[in-house]
Amino acid sequence: MKRILITGTQGYIGSSLADYLNRWPEKYRVDFLSLRDGTWKQADFEPVDAIVHAAAIVHQPKSKDDPAEADVYDRVNHRLTAELAQKAKAEGVSQFLFLSSESVYGLHAPVGKTLTITADTPLHPTDNYGISKRKAEEDLNLLRGDGFRVAILRPPMIYGRGCKGNYQTLAHLAKKLPIFPEIANRRSMLYIDNLCEFLRLLIEDGADGLFCPQNAEYVSTSRMVREIAKAHGKHICLVGGCAWALKLLSHVTALAGKAFGSLCYDQSLSDYPQNYNLVSFEQSIAETEGGA
């Protein structure tokens, strides 16, 4: 039996992973570790096989020039990560899995253009969240070795039952609007259960390295809204010819680019020897919206 320690007990990924791994009580013992005060430094890590570090200050971008905000992100997402990993290595934990982010690339695709992240895409974070995640990755890479394996994940947008963020905005629109723009953009996304299965496989394999998991197929925003509406028994009419209006809107708000621009991982970055995409896109939306 593997003993797994998860941080971020109140976060979406950490709690979802614990629920997922608890499906195999004979294989995994799952415990939580709170990092909200300094008491975690007295915890005994020697019996632990793997730590999944999902705790973080979530993405709430303001200005990377705000020193107070920058320090909060750096303290929690960077320095705390490094301290936790140093203790884990010193006490014999064999694997450290870190939830980083696509934000380390600092890419924002405008409407009508496609940006594809490849192995050669440089890291150029543009906000404090991305900067703090990149710094954490750098420190973790220095700790790798001497029996200490580090798995760094840079997932794209994660969605699923109980998620927050951009998905909920789209779900609200899908349930309220009779029409929606039809834009053939491409986005990398990752259903929470597929992420949890990927993490489970990394733990089983004792994997080390950089990973960019995503769903098996790219998805357009229009298709996602249509599937959400379908899950609620609604028909939403997709209207073409809106690209010019969305391009104009993108000059007013960055949300237009986030919703209708094309930003995706090259599929080769997401390959893994074992299949982790156990849930199709259509089924993932049905499950997220409380259907099948």
Image (tube, rainbow, N blue to C red):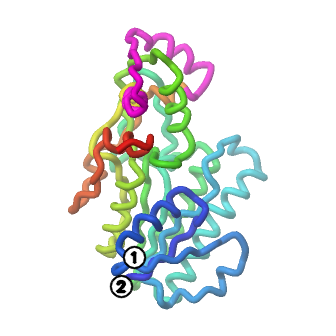
Query: Residue 70 location, x and y as percent?
Result: 71, 53
Query: Residue 4 location, x and y as percent?
Result: 45, 77
Whether residue 114 can be seen here: no
Q: How many marks?
A: 2
Question: Which numbered disc, 2 or 1, marks the residue closer to the eye?
Answer: 2
Q: Could you tell me which residue is drawn at 53 percent across and 68 percent down?
A: 139
Magenta span: 226-255
Q: Is residue 111 magenta?
A: no
Identify the secondary structure beneath mark 2: loop
The image's mark for residue 1 is 2
Q: Could you tell me which residue is drawn at 32 percent across and 46 percent down?
A: 215
Front residue of this view, candidates 290 and 44: 290
Residue 120 in the image: above or below residue 206 = above
The 10 Å Cα crowd at callout 2, few under 14, some 14 to 19, many 20 or more, is few
> What's the amino acid at mark 1?
Arg
Query: Residue 259 location, x and y as percent?
Result: 49, 29
Residue 207 in the image: above or below residue 88 = above
Image quadrant of residue 180? top left
Q: Could you tell me which residue is drawn at 53 percent across and 23 percent down?
A: 176
Residue 231 as seen in the image, left or right of residue 55: left
Query: Residue 280 location, x and y as percent?
Result: 28, 44
> What's the amino acid at mark 2?
Met
Whether residue 52 can be seen here: yes
Labels 2 and 1: the sequence-earlier one: 2
The image's mark for residue 149 is 1
The 10 Å Cα crowd at callout 1, few under 14, some 14 to 19, many 20 or more, is many
Residue 132 in the image: above or below residue 207 = above
Residue 64 as seen in the image, left or right of residue 11: right
Q: Could you tell me which residue is drawn at 31 percent across and 67 percent down?
A: 201
